[in-house]
């Protein structure tokens, strides 16, 4: 087990149009790993200094020798995390900061050469390294998923048939996960770039006073990277599975600064709620590291969907890096100082990452043991699994993204909070009602079926979703080339008022 602190970097961007029009002054200075911020209202006060793993000065142009480019940020953070993934660790990179601070640019960037963010550069580098492999006994497979958390609801950005919010659950073996989230097989960087582009177009963005294209949702791009190795000496097949989580958080904001009203105000409230919870989780984890006696302190992971899904990345089995995006302007001093303090707290968190050696075989064995136990439990009650075949108990969550799940414990155990894997065992005095046992049995069998899917079946499923997406666009009057590019927009034969609105929206978007 490798215990390591969360890597923390800060990056300051150039002035934007709003800041230039208000004749803003720069309050940030950087020297090496140290970042200084000066209070514009108290010029006599000494600057506040913070030290991080990396301090990126991107406020000036590329002619400046101290300028940090997109490539430099990826080289320092993205490449290191990718190497950890090849070693078999779970990794996570997430960007935090106020709205308009440059998070989406750092993570996703632009399509122009030299402006790609960490996510596309990491994906391209991943396949470049995979293609360099000459070992006949080593092969790789890559699957991706892309979701957004909007107003505490989870939406699949890659599956056009996915409607509404997906249910977040927690399994005693698998941990927190999103039920029915599509996981698509990819074989090249071009495949992954197409899916990324489709997901980005589906993201919820809106204009505010602070940012013309403000991300109104948290986006989580996940890569499941599997390395298959055949050992000729023992004639055994082994696997390493790494989960790479790349997170572009929505920006924190003040309603008076962003000018949010109506729906934008509601979105901002939900964004700030989840980011506040993230702050509480980071503070609690940092406090736990500084005071070893408080191991049993409650960590509020389940207070928001975001922190629930990032539970392993924040305090568990993961190598994690945080990038804090900063505004250099004096008019944003309070928000920038808050971001720096947030990042300073995150430095103290330690994660206990383990190499995920051959997890599928172990998972399947544990899940099968769980199925056998649940079947025995049902038989002891005079029932069989067939009694409830095809039926599913009513969702006690009432459509909420955080329902009361039979998989999830009501309180976090100290062992789980330290990032250590805790083998699932059923206490003798545990009482599970028939409906809960049946629901758990059905869900576990569903997970086993997904784990046992062949690579060919995963590719067929990915192709089916691509065809569904193209059919949906054709229905709305969007013509596509064979390579997926857009030819133009036409008027479909059957045009209802609703579909006409969809067509106009797609035309405007494209």
Image (cartoon, rainbow, N blue to C red):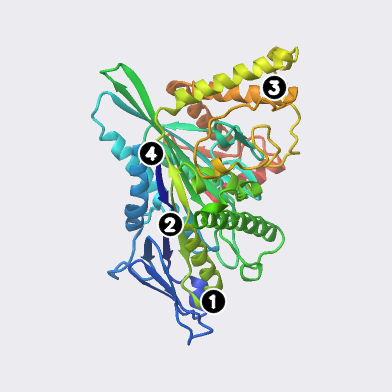
Above/below status of 378 relative to 416: above
Q: Which disc number belongs to residue 106?
A: 2
Helix, strand or loop at disc 1? helix
Tell me which label, 1 or 3, sits earlier in the chain. Answer: 1
Q: How far across and down, in percent of the image, does residue 72 sit?
A: 32, 57
Point out the residue furthest to the bottom here. 44
Which residue is under mark 3? 438
Relative to the observer, which residue lies in front, 483 or 82?
82
Q: Which disc number belongs to residue 190?
A: 4
Q: How far across and down, in percent of the image, does residue 412 sit?
A: 62, 42
Observer-side mark, 2 or 3, equals: 3
Point out the residue furthest to the left here. 134
Observer-side mark, 2 or 4, equals: 2
Task: Say whether residue 85 is visible.
Answer: yes
Graded by Cα atoms within 10 Å as few (under 14), some (14 to 19) or many (20 or more), the crowding at tag 1 reads some
Observer-side mark, 1 or 4, equals: 1
Which residue is under mark 1? 331
Q: Is residue 7 left or right of residue 153?
A: left
Q: How far across and down, in percent of the image, does residue 456 sit?
A: 43, 21
Observer-side mark, 3 or 4, equals: 3
Q: Residue at x 49, y 64 (%)?
A: 101
Q: Is residue 376 left or right of residue 422?
A: right
Marks 2/3: CA distance? 45 Å
Task: Say whether residue 91 is visible.
Answer: no
Helix, strand or loop at disc 2? helix
Helix, strand or loop at disc 3? helix
Marks 1/2: CA distance? 22 Å
Tell me which label, 2 or 3, sits earlier in the chain. Answer: 2
Graded by Cα atoms within 10 Å as few (under 14), some (14 to 19) or many (20 or more), the crowding at tag 2 reads many
């Amino acid at each position: 087990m490798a215990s390591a602190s969360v890597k923390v970097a800060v990056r300051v961007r150039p002035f934007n149009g709003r800041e230039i029009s208000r004749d803003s002054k720069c309050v940030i200075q950087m020297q090496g790993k140290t970042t200084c911020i000066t209070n514009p209202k108290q010029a006599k006060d000494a600057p506040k200094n913070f030290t991080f793993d990396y301090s990126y000065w991107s406020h000036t142009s590329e002619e400046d020798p101290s300028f940090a480019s997109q490539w430099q940020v990826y080289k320092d953070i993205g490449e290191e995390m990718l190497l950890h993934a090849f070693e078999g660790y779970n990794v996570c990179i997430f960007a935090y900061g106020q709205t308009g601070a440059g998070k989406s640019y750092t993570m996703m960037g632009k399509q122009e050469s030299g402006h790609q963010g960490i996510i596309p550069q990491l994906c391209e580098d991943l396949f470049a390294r995979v293609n360099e492999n000459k070992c006949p006994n080593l092969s790789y497979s890559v699957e991706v998923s892309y979701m957004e958390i909007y107003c505490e609801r989870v939406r699949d950005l890659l599956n056009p048939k996915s409607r509404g919010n997906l249910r977040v659950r927690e399994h005693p073996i698998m941990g927190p996960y999103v039920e029915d989230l599509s996981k698509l097989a990819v074989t090249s960087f071009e495949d992954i770039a197409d899916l990324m582009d489709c997901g980005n177009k589906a993201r919820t963005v809106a204009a505010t006073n602070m940012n013309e294209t403000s991300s109104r949702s948290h986006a989580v791009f996940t890569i499941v990277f599997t390395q298959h190795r055949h050992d000729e000496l023992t004639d055994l097949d082994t696997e390493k599975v790494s989960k790479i989580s790349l997170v572009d958080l929505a920006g924190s904001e003040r309603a008076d600064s962003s000018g949010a009203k109506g729906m934008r105000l509601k979105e901002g409230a939900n964004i700030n709620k989840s980011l506040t919870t993230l702050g509480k989780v980071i503070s609690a984890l940092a406090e736990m590291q500084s005071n070893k006696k408080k191991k049993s302190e409650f960590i509020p992971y389940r207070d928001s969907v975001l922190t629930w899904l990032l539970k392993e990345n924040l305090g568990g089995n993961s190598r994690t890096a945080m990038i804090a995006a900063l505004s250099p302007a004096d008019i944003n001093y309070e928000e920038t100082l808050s971001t720096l303090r947030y990042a300073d707290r995150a430095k103290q968190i330690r994660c206990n990452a383990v190499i995920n050696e051959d997890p599928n075989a172990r998972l399947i064995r544990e899940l099968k043991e769980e199925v056998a136990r649940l079947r025995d439990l049902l038989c002891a009650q005079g029932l069989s699994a067939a009694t409830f075949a095809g039926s599913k108990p009513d969702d006690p969550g009432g459509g909420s993204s955080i329902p009361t799940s039979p998989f999830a414990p009501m309180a976090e155990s100290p062992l789980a909070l330290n990032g250590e894997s805790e083998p699932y065992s059923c206490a003798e005095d545990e009482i599970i009602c028939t409906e809960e046992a049946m629901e758990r049995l059905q869900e576990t069998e569903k997970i086993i079926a997904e784990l046992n899917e062949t690579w060919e079946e995963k590719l067929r499923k990915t192709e089916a979703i691509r065809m569904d997406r193209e059919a949906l666009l054709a229905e709305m009057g969007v013509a596509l080339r064979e390579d997926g590019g857009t030819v133009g927009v036409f008027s479909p034969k059957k045009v209802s008022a609703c579909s006409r609105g969809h067509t106009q929206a797609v035309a405007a978007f494209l």
